[in-house]
Image: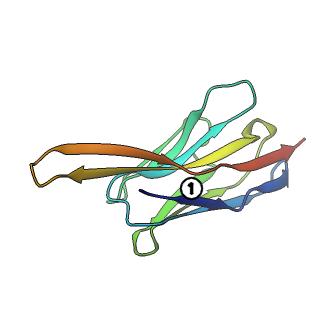
Amino acid sequence: QVQLVESGGGLAQTGGSLRLSCVASRSINSLMGWFRQAPGKQRELVATQTSAGYTNYADGVKGRFTISRDNAKNSVSLQMNSLKPDDTAVYYCYARVITISTSDIVDSKDYWGQGTQVTVSS
């Protein structure tokens, strides 16, 4: 139902910056954000933002990363500053869409992008 396309991943040095972007194929009426997964580790939340602008950050990135949404463009971005080698992971764009049927049945669906690699060298 929703396609999420990420861009902006790549290589960076410790202390450098990268900006990730994600564009959804339709309007997202609930959460958008970013998760990441390093090899052999669990996928973890990085940052999310509601359609109204409320943000949530993982403790390890707060103060270094900034999430922002542009609802008009159905997009979300993640500005990553002061990068560390521990930030190396595949970063996945995430979206949650809430739907209400004509029978007043509320449902939520989660969507994931294909992932973009972020590598931070020491």
Residue drawn at x 40%, y 75% is 72
Residue drawn at x 90%, y 41% is 122
Where is residue 20 shown, x and y percent of the image? 65, 59
Left or right: 75 in relation to 64: left
Where is residue 19 shown, x and y percent of the image? 68, 61
Colour scheme of this structure image? rainbow
Left or right: 27 in relation to 14: left
Rendered position, 34 above or below 37: below
Q: Quadrant of the N terminus?
A: bottom left
Q: 102 or 30: which is nearer to us?
A: 102
Left or right: 78 in relation to 52: right
Which of the 4 quarters of the picture holds residue 27?
bottom left
| Label 1: few (<14), some (14–19) or many (≥20) C-alpha neighbours in 10 Å | some
Left or right: 57 in relation to 28: right
Rendered position, 76 above or below 63: below
Q: 65 or 73: which is nearer to us?
A: 73
Where is residue 61 shown, x and y percent of the image? 61, 42
Residue carrying label 1: 66
Which of the 4 quarters of the picture holds residue 35?
top right
